[in-house]
Image (spheres, coloured by chain):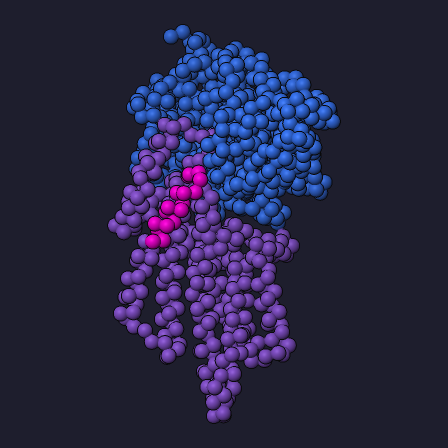
Amino acid sequence: MNVTRTLASSVLALSLAWQAQAANVPDGVTLAENQTYTFWLLDAIKSMDPQINTDAEGSDVLRNLFEGLYNEDEKGGLVPGVALEHEVSEDGKTYTFKLRDNAKWSDGAPVTANDFVYAWRRLADPATASEYAWYMELMQVENASAVVAGDMAPDELGVKAVDEHTLEVKIDAPMPYFPQMLVHASTFPVPQSVIDANGDNWTRAGTLVGNGAYTLVEHQLGERVVMEKNDTYWDAEHTVLQTVIALTINDVNQGLTRYMAGELDRVDMPAGQYPRMEKEYPDQATSVPYNCSYIYMLNVGEKGPEALKDVRVRKALSYAIDRDIIVDKILQGGQHPSYNWTHWATAGFEIPDIEYADWTQPERLEKAKELLTEAGYGPDKPLSLRLQYNTSEDHKKIAIAASQMLKQIGVNLTLDNYEWKVHTDRMQSQDFDMARYAWCGDYNEASTYLDLMASYSGHNNGEFFNDDYDAVIKDSKTAEDPLPLYQKAEMILADEMPIIPLYHYAKVFMLKEDIKGWPLDNLNQSWYAKDLYRVAE
Amino acid sequence: MFSYILKRIAIAIPTLLVLIVISFVLMHAAPGGPFTAERELPPEVMANLNAKYGLDDPLWKQIGTYVWNIVSAFDFGPSFVYKDRTVNEIIAQGFPITLTYGLISFVLAVLVGVTLGVAAAIRHNSMLDYIAVGMSIGAQVLPNFVMAPILVLVFTLWLGWLPGGGWQGPEYWILPVIALSTSFMASIARITRSSMLEVLTSNHIRTARAKGLPERRVILRHALKPAMLPVISYLGPAFVAMITGSVVVDIYFSTGGIGKAFVDSALNRDYAVMMGVTILVGALTIFFNLVVDILYGWIDPKIRY
């Protein structure tokens, strides 16, 4: 096999790495005595098993207990984790990772390529029944779909240990962003011996063996998680925080009160609080771009309303909604009004020139009215649609605002509030007209958004089936520079308007001013406690 | 009496079975399932999950297996959402917490509630009566979801005396107990007061007073016991409600108790946990209703089983 050394990107990653590993404490900074960091969790951690976990809060904990091939730095770039570097074959379909030889499990055993092979097979294995088994398919690891479907044995998955410290992965098609996907918690290695010995109980505090910078010392479900610095971690020397505590507080407002009382070092802010907190606590109130996008999905499929099959109607609806009001008056937390799907700050992505984004709102309204009249709707034939959203004060406020805005062009919107499971179930059975939807990228690259609107996607609940779109997405997978294709895909979405983009998220939170090292420029807001430190007052 | 208890237990078993079947069917009739997520799972992934959790069997078979596992091994199955835990473990972790703050709240509510009620009844239409009635109405109209954040605001943020939540030791019990017990306390006080007022005008009290018994003896020995009857029938279900926790207390004070599991398991469609807590509460309710009936027989000699 003809293997080329990996490109500039990984060499760059490597050189960055030696500075960015663990807490990057500048010279002259005095560290505080107390190196305990307490953060807020909205909910109980559903699982501490990397291959079973499905949510972002779980990943926040898992990133500290385990370490995958790569980590993210403060800007979201890749830095070595267990892998030092990788090589890609000329056809772009074989990745060979060189693993560090000083990585250890918290029980002292070395971390080897076999641990990754075991974990990845475990993720795909039907016996594990992981909800995230599809991530192996998304990564296009060879035979992933067949293994998940039970048609092939897990050991036929395209991943193997060449030797103790060399991992080889074969993927079905070249995918330039493949390494970015490796920061996802479901790809973290797990210790086979511990799992074999303890079964499902292996994730208990005291039993769990990880390879991250911290070990699990206490887990009271729905109450707290306590992690202590792991001395066997390869970079323990540069890890500053000694204890990391997660407190579950199911109510955001209650979380903020307890933050103010000094019980927490970090908490998400309830909507609408940012302007006040920013004024009163400028050193603590923070708003940064966050890798999620909020839309109203339109049902353009068979079961959808007749009106929405007309692109003029879809455009009229989109034009009539004033994003600025939603962002500035309702959310007030630094979110960006959006006219496209992919988050504006996504790495390597630039929003194309979408015409209506540059119009003023009166212009958009004018155009909306025109389009609606053209489509045959007006005072004599008013258009009535239903908008459904899942239970949340914010979604409700936005929906009410949207219904008022659409009233201006003569569209009557009936609002339906459903609890989350019902909302999702109705969307997936195409039982809706317009529905609130949001997506948070699995990784920092535009395909995590754009793939979702392809006809074969499990997210495309509005049944937007467009051959051109599918072709563009397919081409982007193998393109040297996928940006023009991503932009083309966005243009198709703007022309066809199967979704109404509303805003791009911001993460709005309070962080104690003596906690440093927070990855403000990391769009995923993936943080590693090993990078944080507390300075003396 | 013994045969009565046996009879009640014999009725309890089919009652629980009916409860299981109805809950099971209702739960599965709700739209969405435990694995409904914003990304519709590929069919092969869904098939693996359904196979692992037995959801691909017909409903009658699922119910049968479920009941059999409980009867034969006391196994309530694995949680569908907290995937590395079983329902037994979740209840074993959360129930002692709610039991702790529930029992303390219960004792406090009964002691304060009964004392307040009796005092108000004895000093009928006095200042004490008005204060007691005013307080209990006040406590009842202030719902605990309003009281809980206010307690945290005052005792944690402003005064800094108590932790705002968590479950690490006795100082963490105080706020949940206050939040949970007040409204029960108020109800007990009101029921005690009106029942006591009624008893105090009855014939046997008049007789007792006519005998020249000291008032203290009249109240404690002759009036209190019959006045407790309506209170006790209220206490049975109230006791179960308190020891199985309150979703409000669990959410606002992050206790990790089982109360929150009721709402969470329903919203998450965590079928197994939902069944587990339903059966727990069902069994406790049946048991404590029996206890109440036995207490009745002891207090009121007119009642014979």
Q: Residue at x 46, y 86 (%)?
A: B204
Counting from the top left corner in percent of width and height, residue A509 is at 61, 38
Q: Residue furthest bottom?
A: B211
Left or right of A365 on screen, residue B17: left
Quarter of the image with the N terminus of chain A in it:
top left
Counting from the top left corner in percent of width and height, residue B199 is at 49, 80
Left or right of A215 on screen, residue A118: left
The quadrant holding residue A377 is: top right
Examine the rendering and report whether any part of residue A518 can be seen. Answer: no
Q: Work out whether B170 lies above or below A45.
A: below
Chain letter for the blue part? A
Q: Work out whether B113 lies above or below B26.
A: below
Left or right of B228 on screen, residue A197: left
Q: Is residue A124 magenta?
A: no
Magenta span: predominant SS is helix
Q: Residue at x 42, y 38 (%)?
A: B33
Examine the rendering and report whether any part of residue A493 can be seen. Answer: yes
Q: Work out whether B300 lies above or below A446.
A: below
Q: Is residue B20 magenta?
A: yes
Q: Colour of chain B?
A: purple
Q: Residue at x 39, y 60 (%)?
A: B285
Counting from the top left corner in percent of width and height, residue A323 is at 67, 30
Along the line of sight, the residue nearer the viewer: A18 or A61:
A61
Q: Work out whether B219 lies above or below A307.
A: below
Q: Residue furthest front?
A: A380
Counting from the top left corner in percent of width and height, residue A37 is at 55, 41
Left or right of B224 on screen, residue A358: right
Q: Which residues are magenta?
A: B18-34
